[in-house]
Image: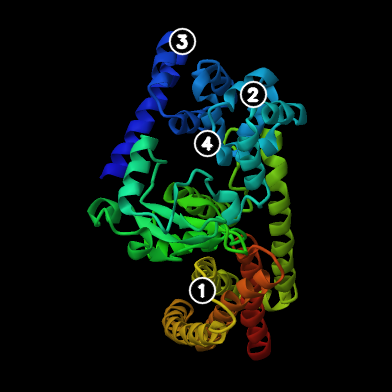
Amino acid sequence: MAATQSKENQKDLLQLIIDLLKQKRFNDIKIQLEEMHPAEIAHLLESLPHEQRDRIWHHVPVESEGEVLLHLNDNIRASYIQKMDPVDLVAATEKLDEDDLADLLPDMPRDVIQEILLSLEQTDRDRLKAVLYYPEDTAGGLMDLDTVTVRADITLDVVLRYLRQRTSLPPSTDNLFVIDREGHYLGLLPLTTILTGDPNAHVHELMTYDEDSILADTPEREVANRFQQRDLITAPVISEDGMLLGRITIDDVVDVIRDEADRSLMGMAGLHEEEDMFAPVVTSARRRAVWLGVNLLTALLASWVIALFENTIQQFVALAILMPIVASMGGIAGSQTLTLVVRGIALGQVSASNARRLFTKELQVGIWNGVIWALVMAVIAGFWFKNIDISLLIGSAIIINLIIAAMTGAIVPLLLQRFGIDPALAGSVVLTTITDVVGFLAFLGLATIFLL
């Protein structure tokens, strides 16, 4: 209910901004933008065509520009960075944390990067370099450097006095990180323990040792899985030698999960997750042309198989009528298995150790569904065309195609992953090609053998 209400509010806000633009009430637009969170402004900009988007951008509060850029998708962000004056770009990044700044720098012009680095204090510059050292799709690339650390040999009373002196804590802080004199990570000290524990007790007596630490080179997908499995709010990021580098917070993980979902959804259509809905027509057409070309090649292959049995189809019109059913049933069955396996790979539930068991299980499912729906379709075809041979043919073809579809759906994602290809992107194309070709080949091939 809350999610539905939120969507309605977003629609109302979008319509309000469009109406204000039409009426040229720019002062009202500025007031609306000042009341909005930077992420909401970014969402609004992504929902508008280019000309309206550019007119809104001129009224975005200067102090929010950096965070708005951070929340925009890559393509739109890059376009605004190219348009902005270097001085404005440097000013927009002044209030950003080092981990957020690290996300923006790759899109910045080289001279602007130099200006930004020169504007930072040496300590902040070193922290920024530490984040940039790791790929953005790893724990090191995700981490926030703003951590609160304590040593194990002090009392809770000392910790409390230290926290009062700080006056504030980083967002999403649920634990303090315990380190030794050299900065090696030892464990966690929960805030609840600090508040409820004996003030005279030492940290090492109450801390949780080496809990939930994540190596800096851990892929972001594994990081998200760990947060999900252990219900974490924050987790420490450490180097290979155990040095505390930073922390990952739940809001970072939510972004990873959202990006992964977008990547899978858009990838199945051959699109990039950062696709701009209102990108220029030529740009969108060019990007989609590659995928359409691949699809055309697979369709031509299926048509070539059909053409091999042209004489058979001419003599039995029923074959042309029933032929799409065989391919469609195989495609749906294969997609079910493919989706299950791709999801399992994404969650780390499928590996070489259990792949054979999964393959056997999906093969059995394919056999069962093949037999059941072969019988159903055989009965339908028998009543439809009053021909027992046609009934047997389509039933046999459905069994064959559903079995092949199950095998393909289980094997293809694992093979693609082994060759470094995203299964979510290429799996459906390979699957559709195989189920179409096998379906037509089985149905028309059996018809050629037994009807001619």
Number of residue marks? 4
Q: How far is the residue under mark 2 from the one under mark 1?
A: 50 Å
- Label 1, secondary structure: give it: helix
Q: Position of residue 55 (x, y in %)?
A: 55, 17
Distance, label 3 to label 2, CA atoms, is: 26 Å
**Hey, what amino acid is under mark 2?**
Val
Q: Is residue 112 above or below residue 73?
A: above
Residue situated in front as seen by the camera: 134 or 84: 134
Indicate the secondary structure of the residue bearing disc 3.
helix
Q: CA distance from mark 3 to mark 1?
A: 53 Å
**Residue identifier under label 2:** 90
| Mark 1 Cα shell of 10 Å, populated few (<14), some (14-19), many (≥20) | many
Mark 4 residue type = His
In this rendering, does residue 402 appear at all? yes
Element type at mark 4: helix
* Disc number for residue 337: 1
Q: Nearer the viewer, residue 448 or 136?
A: 136
As drawn, is 195 to the left or to the right of 413? left
Which of labels 1 and 4 is toward the front?
4
Identify which residue is drawn at 38% across, 32% down.
10
Q: Is residue 246 left or right of residue 4?
A: right
Residue 71, numbered label = 4
Which of discs 4 and 2 lies nearer the camera? The answer is 2
- Residue shown at 30% from the left, 49% from the top: 157
Quadrant holding the N terminus: top left
Left or right, residue 206 beside residue 103: left
Element marked by disc 2: helix
Which quadrant is home to the C terminus?
Answer: bottom right
Q: Earlier in the sequence, mark 4 or mark 2?
A: 4
Q: Gap between marks 1 and 4, in whole Å?
A: 35 Å
Above or below, 345 against 203 in this view is below
